[in-house]
Image (cartoon, rainbow, N blue to C red):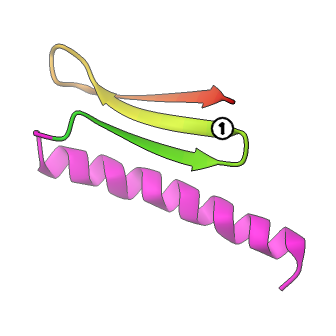
Amino acid sequence: MNKRQRKKHAYKKYIRDIFEGYEKMLADPAIDELHFTYLKETTFLERDAQRKIHFTTREK
């Protein structure tokens, strides 16, 4: 598998993990935050004071 395909598969896994994490947070209110990393960016799923889930993506 060439470099472009590996990168594409890694990105698909990153996106899939984010949405699975979101579903996990919806099912289990005890989870306060999750972190996912891909290359130079990190996505945080966090709950606020009203227990709503927020997505935040930051560059490293």
Side of 38 where 16 appears, left or right: left
Q: Position of residue 28 (x, y in %)?
A: 12, 48
Residue 51 belongs to magenta span: no
Which percent across, then down, holds residue 25? 22, 45
Instruction: State how many labels appear.
Output: 1
Task: Residue at 61%, 27% (x, y): give it.
Answer: 58
Image coordinates of residue 59 in percent, x first then y, are 68, 29
Q: Nearer the viewer, residue 37 or 28?
A: 37
Residue positioned 56% across, 30% down in the render: 57
Picture quarter with the C terminus: top right
Residue at image position (32%, 29%) is 46
Considering the whole magenta stretch, tell me its main secondary structure. helix
The residue where tag 1 is placed is 41
Residue type at mark 1 is: Glu
x and y, in percent, of residue 3 in the image: 87, 72
Q: Nearer the viewer, residue 50 or 42?
A: 42
54 is higher (above) or lower (below) than 36: above
The N terminus: image quadrant: bottom right
Which residue is at the far top?
49
Please give the name of the residue rendered at 22% of the width and 33% of the height, measured from the top-left corner: 32
Q: Residues in magenta?
A: 1-30
Above or below, 22 against 41 in this view is: below
Asked if residue 15 is positioned above or below residue 56 in the image, the reply reads below
